[in-house]
Image: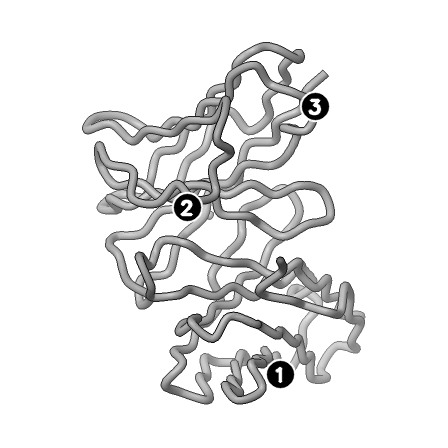
Amino acid sequence: DQQVKQNSPSLSVQEGRISILNCDYTNSMFDYFLWYKKYPAEGPTFLISISSIKDKNEDGRFTVFLNKSAKHLSLHIVPSQPGDSAVYFCAAISGGTSYGKLTFGQGTILTVHP
Amino acid sequence: NAGVMQNPRHLVRRRGQEARLRCSPMKGHSHVYWYRQLPEEGLKFMVYLQKENIIDESGMPKERFSAEFPKEGPSILRIQQVVRGDSAAYFCASSPGQGAGQPQHFGDGTRLSIL
């Protein structure tokens, strides 16, 4: 049962344009969401997060939007740079029994062309 | 990903052997998490430990897999009698405490290959 879904396996964007990565979830107990970036042969690197009590969080070129009613979140990267090319994972936490368990989506490969 | 150290980076084992994966958390972090990534998939949670305690092992296979985080030394993920299906990248993460506001920081993983 895939509780966090990233339905676009890949996304290609021109340098300078906006990249929009999407994520859907099914578990209404999730109350915190994170985005990680991953380069080949490296571990995921934390990018940005958002609590379920907010609908937007911004950090530099990265903005995460949360639509709780639609159980949908998105990551916007503006402007996109070639160095942003990587796999992006959406992850969620449920505050139920512990905050230890991150549930990840399958990832979206972002390619930013110069 | 400086900080969380995993070794070895690559490990090759034959079917039936044991695999031991080590993880040293970032300085000041007392919470350790293990995840497994199969080819073409996202990371799947395995286990969450604090020093000398297993907090959540809901993602661990019931047999052959065990994890520990002793008072001294790194956290160890141990896989006994490995099978081909254990081939994957195993990632360790750490955080300073429990709570959604303390993101987990990942190591670069151990790539386990089973011959």
Question: Residue at label 1?
Answer: A78
Q: Which residue is denoted by mark 3 in the rendering?
A: B84
Q: Quick one: B98 or B16, which is closer to the camera? A: B16
Q: Alpha carbon of mark 1 to alpha carbon of mark 2: how far?
A: 28 Å
Lower position in the chain sequence, tag 2 or tag 3: 3
Query: Where, quadrant-wise, is the N terminus of chain A in this rendering?
Result: bottom right
- What is the chain identity of the residue bearing mark 2? B
Quickly name the residue at label 2. B93
Q: Residue at x 71, y 67 (%)?
A: A82
Residue A64: image location, x then y, percent: 52, 81
Which residue occupies 47% across, 48% down?
B1
Q: What's the residue at 60%, 25% (across, down)?
A: B10
Q: Residues within 10 Å of mark 1 (few under 14, many from 20)?
A: some
Q: How many neighbours does mark 3 have within 10 angstroms: few (below 14), some (14-19), or many (20 or more)?
A: some
Q: Up-down: is B32 above or below A99?
A: above
Question: How far apart, in angstroms, are the residues tagged by discs 2 and 3?
Answer: 24 Å
Nearer to us of marks 3 and 1 is 3
Q: Residue visible at 58% across and 86% down?
A: A70
Which chain hosts label 3? Answer: B
Is residue B94 placed above or below B52 in the rendered structure?
A: below
Extreme residue toward the left, this view: B71
